[in-house]
Every structure is written in C-alpha cells, then in structure tokens.
Amino acid sequence: MEMLVVTSASLLAGFVDSIVGGGGLILVPVLFAVFPGAPPATLLGTNKSASIWGTAAAAAQFSQRVQMRWGALWPAALLGFAGSMLGAWGVTMFPGDFLRKALPLILLGVLLYTLARKDMGRMHAPRFSGRAETLAACAIGLAIGLYDGFFGPGAGSFLVFLFVRWMGYDFLNASASAKIINTLTNAAALVLLAAKGHVWWHYGLVMAVANVAGSVLGTRVALKHGAGFVRVVFIVVVSALILKTAYDAFLK
C-alpha cells in the first residue's frame, strides 16, 4: 500500500513540477505522512532520487520544442551545482531559522508583483545577449543553487520568476531554462544524501518511473497551452508555497 501511495504522489508531483516547479509540495508531505518514523534526511533523499529524473525528462522535452540558450544555461547550471554543494555545507555551519521566517514574505512579494504585472512573462523578449546573458544566468544559477542547497523550498519557482523578471523570458521559456539548472542543483543534493546512505532506492526507482510519466504529460500540456497557462500554474504553486512555508515558519 505504501508503494502505491507514494508512487501516485510522485506521478502528480512530476506533472506539476514539469510545468513550473513545486512538485516537492506534493511528494515530500506524502512521504512524511506514509513513513512518520523515518529520518527526514532519508525521506528528502528518496524524494530527490525520484524527482531529479522527472526534472531531467522535462528539460529534455522542452529542449526539443523551445529554443534553449545553451551558451548561457550550461555555465549557469554548473554554477548551480557548485552553489547547491556549498549551500548544503552551509547548513552544517549556520542556522537557517531567519530564512524560514523570511521565505513566506519573499514569496508573497513575488506573487503580488506577478499579479500586478499582468503582461509579465507573456512575451518572450530576452533582455541580454552574449556575455551579458551568460553572466546574468550564472548569477541566477549560483544564487538559487546556494539557496536550494541551504534551504530548498520554492527553488524552481524562484528560478522561473528570475528568468521572467530579470532575463525577459516568457513563462514557457523561463520554465524550460529553470529545468536545466534545477536538474543540476538536485543532482548535487542527491550526491550528498546518497553518499551518506539517505536514499531508499527500492522506493526511489519506482517513484522515478512515475515521476517521469507525470513530467512527460505535464510538459506536453505546458507546450500545448503556452506561456499564459504556465503563468496561471505559477501563481497557484507560489500561493500554495506561501501557505506551506508560513505554516512551517509560524504555526508548526
């Protein structure tokens, strides 16, 4: 029964995550509910062992249909990997309580800004080119990589927002670009957690198959309906993140 529940959750998480990120909102709470006595690090590692494949599958699908700016994305993704490693090390050195309490407010600012700018992310008009675009993408990759390794919630949504707001991408291209960086930041976390034995591979591999299936479906839906649809899903996911992080920070 446990396998059926977590596999179903992984399928749904892959669908949502492939569109705009936020799949962890679904899968992580289910893992904690199904295995209440398990070490948190093991549940997080098992989540990563499944979700990374869905993210990679979404990146592969997007790259076939969206004109990816690889010259900027590969350096940004590699810096995201390094940043995630550094952020994970930082968890052992510095408390993260300040970030836990600030996160709901930051996300609220992102949501309000997105709602106020109704045309934001509907048109694809990259603001930078050449070296400037590479440097801007690298700054995003490193910053979100550090955040993802140190804390984590909403990393995919922050990537999408920054690619839209700062880089001038539409929501579809921003989501596609975010998947490349997010795959590498997830890989960094998975390497660290797996090295310490915090992955249940017998669950993770089955969940990975379901996550990829959900990701394939979600990517097709996003490509079919375009930037406007991705914008709506982004608003829904960020709203859910605000509620979840506010509860964790102030009520839990």
Image (tube, rainbow, N blue to C red):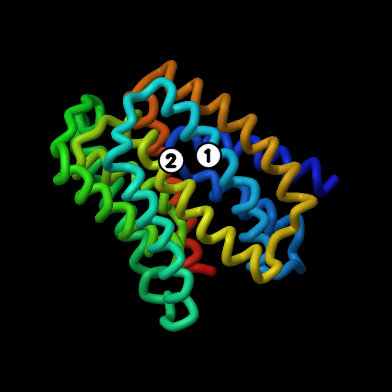
Of residue 55 and residue 78, the one placed in the foreground of this image is 78
Q: Name the kind of residue labelled 1 in the image.
A: Ala
Compared to residue 20, the image places residue 146 above or below, namely: below
Left or right: where 170 falls relative to 54: left
Residue at numbered disc 2: 179
- In this orientation, does residue 92 appear? yes
In the rendered image, residue 56, in percent from the top left (x then y), is placed at 52, 39
Tell me the number on the disc at residue 219: none
Residue at numbered disc 1: 56
Which residue is drawn at the image coordinates 59% and 41% (left, top)?
53
Of residue 101 and residue 174, the one placed in the foreground of this image is 174
| The N terminus lies in quadrant | top right
| The C terminus lies in quadrant | bottom right
Which residue is drawn at the image coordinates 14% and 39% (left, top)?
128
In the rendered image, residue 36, in percent from the top left (x then y), is placed at 74, 64
Which residue is drawn at the image coordinates 29% and 34% (left, top)?
69
- In this orientation, does residue 246 appear? no
Instruction: Report the number of discs.
Output: 2
Report which quarter residue 148 is drawn in. Answer: bottom left
Compared to residue 119, the image places residue 75 above or below, namely: below
Left or right: where 223 falls relative to 168: right
In the rendered image, residue 64, in percent from the top left (x then y), is placed at 43, 23
Of residue 120 and residue 186, the one placed in the foreground of this image is 186
Of residue 86 and residue 167, the one placed in the foreground of this image is 86
Compared to residue 43, the image places residue 62 above or below, namely: above
First-in-chain label (1 vs 2): 1
Report which quarter residue 249 is drawn in. Answer: bottom left
Assess whether mark 2 and mark 1 are in contact (beta carbons under 8 angstroms): yes
Mark 1–mark 2 Cα distance, whole angstroms, equals 7 Å
What element does badge 2 sit on? Answer: helix
